[in-house]
């Protein structure tokens, strides 16, 4: 049943030949040189400081939700940088390739990217930003924060948590590898059919795109299960549903969306895979394939995915705005209801992504009204945040500023979204950069929330704040750049510029395109400030304790800062909705537990990492059609799961004396501290 | 439970000896959620089948009435329901801690599942031999993938049962093993439910 493929194939190397390495492309060779230098520097530093063992014992094999969260965020930030580089290339190409007389360099007729390469760049930009930057960073944040907010020791399934992380990592490595071995999909991040079918995309690009998403989305689904069970089952005593912080609520709703939406993406991609590998006819042009089946399946996932990303962002706003207004959140109950209303509607709006693609007026009408309905709960949220701010005692720290900028972006993106909810408007602006500017406002509001959250919760994990001065510069340059790039883009959308253009035929767009390019340069400056912020904060490391903001409200700030790896020495009893604020109001916030008891902790394990790496080789084998490698990897994954199921390790117990020591000297228990080897419990001790 | 009350004499700030949560109940809930996501995979496949179950998508090839065999499908249904019954009887033995009873139930369950898979393989290989494989038409693609995805679930279920056959005598009824046996029962009933849906939707409705 194997399909015929173009080009050479050998049993040992599959489709992989020396020509698959793009050593003739100066851009990729340059990128490779930079990546190689950075990679060697990192490896060299690890070896020079003799930290390899530390890295393995304390991070790679870790099942601690905070470390896993931090690793998610690091992966997300690296991919964010990569996605930004792609964005910069798109904008630079469009700024250069204007009109028939524009020069071309590096083998391109106009600009510096030939169309095929340009197509790969925008496909990679979308795929990376949504699935490998925003998703891991938000997953990481929920991983770090939610167990602390509900007073839990860890996630419900710490081992599966590590597995989710390493599956996501495997997908991210595949995307990065496509730069240097073979090529990436040139069919857009949505994978337009039948363009992604074998006859039209004969290379490995689509396979890279497909398997990277498939593997990482298994990780996301597992993480969704973990989060939901954690929130339902692991709450501290007294933490009733309506005492949960809003961020925990949004995490719950977002993971319900993730759990139900990602399997559909898996089906869409698997059916595409069946077409590409077995020659079936789900989405082919001819032989009974149905193109709209793919489009519908993809967006049945694609639209909920947008809310999968935006709801945690709303949760972040709902935590940070009350903290820096020194008031409880206005309209807590309506906030929760609005969150679930948005989640509910998210399954009934997918068709608005293709109003112009052959649906009748009745269908378009339904999805148009459903889309507009989203505006109601979102409006409730915006007003709730505004009333929280109203007559509050405001402090404009960087997290607060990011939240306020996020509100403006939400307004801009939301109102243009309401315009796009009208099917008739789509006949003018479908696939124009107006749409691009609209959804970039939305994803940049998510970005703003992410930066807010990182700045806000950074001291909780590491015990020192991020540098405020550079943070402010980062904020202002970033926000200004966003305005410059996307307001110009809205204008170009109205002038009729369609998306994904490698060549600009209308020279009158030049002024706006150059404005956008200037904005991109400002983004570069903002990244500089971001790096400097990290450097200065790390260099100065002013230690903080407890609640470093002085007005935080929720349970995660009740434990020590930096948070010890066992989270709470004694499980707290929750008495109020904003527990810390309640304790502070009644003068109880300094009360510490007097006596400790043994804490049962899970042991670290290397198996999730091994399974993640095998998932990577499995994907690589399938992409290059190296059947033995894929088969061996799959077999090894199954074996690893079975072997793990025979593991008798029951975890270990942290003794009260040790906890007392760590409570006195928190540096022993912080996230960077190295823990001594501990003996696991025996079956007899556990009972 | 009020949202907020002033602290009084009975107010506790910490809760020592908090037992946390019940591991088996957390794992069971987690497994239910996994089945929800798996059910959505089948939803997607059923949708694809519904969309491609028409003469256009059959591309002049056969459609359901020409390829499905209701009688064979009925035997398959008996086999899969019998397999579920055997496993369930095994879990009755679990209540009394009877290792042999549980293992007997699992062995019977595996045998009946193999009967099912024999019929299914016979069915699908016959279609392939007649040139009606998934690469023939959009309709046949949907038929093969829907039926084979269910079959694959059975294969993994059998693998899981084999592992349990080793773990029951070696590890005994430890918390882990019991949790796995309970989840496996849910998984086995889940795949049987899916098969009943496939039988009704593809085999029975398809016959007319």
Image (cartoon, helix red, strand yellow):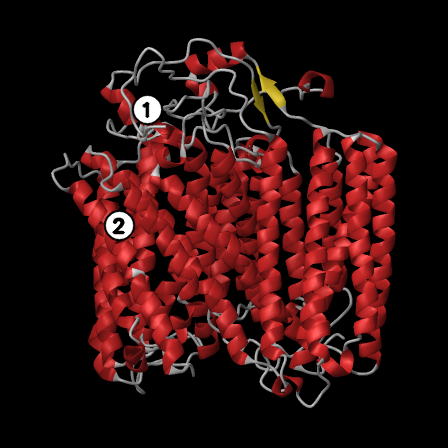
Provide the secondary structure element on which disc 1 rests.
Answer: loop
Whole-angstrom CA distance, mark 2 to mark 1, is 35 Å
Q: Image point 58% across, 85% down: which residue?
A: A285
Label 1: how many residues lie within 10 Å, few (<14), some (14-19) or many (20+)? few
The spot of residue B179 in percent (x, y) is: 69, 36
Instruction: Name the subunit of mark 1.
Output: A
Q: Position of residue A273 (x, y in %)?
A: 63, 69
> A10 or A273: which is nearer to us?
A273
Which circle's residue, 2 or 1, is located before the other in the chain? 2
> Is A644 placed left or right of A117 in the picture?
right
Residue A532 visible in this rendered orientation of the protein: no
- Residue A325's quadrant in the figure? top left
Residue A419 lies, with reference to residue A598, above or below; the image says below
Residue A575 can be seen, yes or no: yes
Q: Residues within 10 Å of mark 2 (few under 14, many from 20)?
A: many
Chain letter of the residue beneath label 2 in the structure image: A
Disc 2 is placed on an element classified as helix
At x 62% / y 21%, what residue is drawn? A652
Q: Quadrant of the C terminus of chain B?
A: bottom right
* Label drawn at residue A261: none
User: Where does the image place residue A338, in percent across and percent down from the top left?
Assistant: 32, 51
Question: Who is closer to the viewer here, A590 or A538?
Answer: A590
Where residue A105 appears, as percent x and y from the top left, is 39, 76
- Residue drawn at (25%, 52%), measured in percent from left and top? A380
* Residue that badge 2 annotates: A381
Q: Residue furthest left?
A: A391
Disc 1: which residue: A543
Left or right, A529 with respect to A612, comes to left
């Amino acid at each position: 049943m194997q399909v015929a493929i173009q080009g050479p194939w050998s049993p040992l190397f599959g489709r992989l030949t020396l020509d698959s390495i793009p050593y003739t492309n100066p851009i990729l060779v340059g990128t490779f040189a930079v990546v190689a230098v950075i990679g060697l520097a990192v490896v060299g530093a690890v070896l020079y400081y003799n930290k390899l063992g530390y890295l393995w014992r304390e991070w790679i094999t870790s099942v601690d939700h905070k470390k896993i969260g931090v690793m998610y965020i690091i992966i997300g930030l690296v991919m964010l940088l990569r996605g930004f580089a792609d964005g910069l290339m798109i904008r630079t190409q469009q700024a250069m390739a204007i009109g028939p007389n524009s020069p071309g360099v590096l083998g391109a007729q106009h600009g510096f990217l030939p169309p095929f390469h340009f197509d790969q760049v925008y496909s990679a930009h979308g795929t990376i930003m949504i699935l490998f930057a925003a998703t891991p960073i938000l997953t990481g944040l929920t991983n770090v924060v939610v167990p602390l907010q509900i007073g839990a020791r860890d996630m419900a399934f710490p081992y599966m948590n590590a597995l989710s992380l390493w599956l996501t990592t495997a997908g991210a490595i595949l995307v990065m590898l496509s730069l240097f071995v073979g090529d990436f999909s040139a069919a857009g991040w949505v994978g337009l059919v039948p363009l992604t079918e074998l006859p039209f995309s004969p290379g490995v690009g689509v396979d890279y795109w497909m398997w990277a998403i498939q593997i990482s989305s298994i990780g996301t689904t597992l993480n969704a299960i973990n989060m939901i069970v954690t929130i339902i089952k692991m709450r501290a005593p007294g933490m009733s549903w309506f005492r949960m912080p809003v961020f925990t609520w949004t995490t719950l709703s977002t993971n319900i969306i993730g759990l139900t939406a990602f399997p559909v993406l898996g089906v869409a991609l698997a059916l595409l895979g069946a077409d590409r590998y077995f020659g079936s006819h789900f989405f082919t042009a001819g032989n009974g394939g149905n193109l709209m089946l793919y489009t519908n399946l993809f967006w049945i996932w694609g639209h909920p995915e947008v809310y999968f990303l935006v709801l945690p962002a709303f949760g972040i706003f709902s935590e940070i705005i009350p903290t820096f207004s020194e008031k409880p959140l206005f309209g807590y109950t309506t906030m929760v209801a609005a969150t679930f209303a948005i989640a509910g509607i998210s399954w009934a709006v997918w068709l608005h992504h293709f109003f112009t693609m052959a649906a009748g007026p009745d269908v378009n009408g339904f999805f148009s009204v459903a889309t507009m309905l989203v505006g109601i709960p979102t409006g409730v949220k915006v007003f709730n945040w505004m009333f929280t701010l109203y007559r509050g005692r405001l402090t404009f720290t960087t997290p607060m500023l990011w939240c306020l900028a996020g509100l403006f972006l939400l307004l801009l993106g939301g109102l243009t979204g309401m315009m796009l909810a009208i099917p008739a408007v789509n006949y003018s602006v479908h696939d124009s950069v107006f749409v691009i500017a609209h959804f970039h406002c939305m994803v940049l509001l998510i970005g703003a929330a992410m930066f807010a959250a990182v700045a806000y919760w950074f001291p909780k994990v590491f015990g020192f704040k991020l540098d405020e001065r550079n943070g402010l510069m980062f904020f202002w340059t970033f926000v200004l750049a966003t305005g410059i790039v996307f307001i110009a883009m809205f204008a170009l959308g109205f002038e009729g510029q369609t998306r994904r253009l490698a060549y600009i035929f209308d020279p009158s767009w030049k002024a706006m395109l150059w404005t956008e390019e200037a904005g991109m340069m400002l983004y570069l400056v903002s990244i500089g400030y971001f790096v400097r912020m990290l450097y200065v904060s790390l260099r100065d490391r002013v230690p903080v304790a407890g609640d470093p903001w002085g007005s935080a409200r929720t349970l995660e700030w009740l434990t020590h800062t930096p948070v010890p790896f066992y989270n709470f020495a004694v499980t707290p009893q929750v008495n109020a909705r904003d527990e810390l604020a309640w304790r502070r109001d009644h003068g109880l916030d300094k009360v510490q537990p007097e006596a400790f008891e043994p804490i049962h902790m899970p042991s670290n394990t290397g198996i999730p990492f091994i399974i993640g790496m095998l998932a990577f080789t499995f994907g690589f084998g399938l992409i290059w059609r190296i059947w033995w490698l894929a088969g061996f990897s799959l077999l090894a994954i199954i074996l690893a799961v079975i072997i793990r199921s025979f593991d008798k390790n029951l975890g270990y117990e942290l003794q009260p004396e040790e906890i007392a020591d760590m409570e006195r000297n928190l540096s022993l228990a912080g996230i960077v501290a190295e823990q001594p080897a501990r003996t696991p419990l025996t079956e007899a001790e556990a009972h | 439970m009020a949202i907020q009350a002033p602290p009084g004499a009975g107010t506790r700030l910490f809760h020592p000896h908090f037992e946390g949560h019940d591991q088996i109940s957390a794992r069971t809930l987690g497994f239910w959620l996994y089945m929800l996501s798996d059910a959505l995979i089948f939803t997607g496949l059923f949708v694809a089948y519904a969309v491609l179950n028409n003469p256009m998508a059959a591309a002049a090839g056969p459609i359901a009435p020409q390829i499905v065999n209701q009688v064979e499908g009925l035997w398959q249904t008996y086999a899969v329901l019998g397999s579920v019954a055997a496993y369930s009887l095994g879990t009755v033995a679990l209540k009394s801690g009877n290792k042999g009873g549980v293992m007997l139930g699992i062995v019977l369950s595996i045998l009946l599942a193999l009967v099912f898979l024999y019929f299914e393989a016979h069915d699908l290989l016959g279609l392939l031999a007649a040139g009606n494989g998934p690469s023939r038409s959009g309709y046949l693609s949907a038929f093969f993938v829907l039926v084979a995805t269910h079959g694959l679930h059975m294969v993994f279920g059998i693998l899981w049962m084999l592992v349990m056959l080793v773990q029951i005598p070696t590890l005994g009824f430890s918390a882990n093993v019991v949790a796995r046996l309970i989840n496996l029962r849910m998984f086995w009933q889940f795949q049987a439910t899916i098969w009943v849906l496939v039988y009704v939707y593809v085999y029975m409705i398809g016959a007319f």
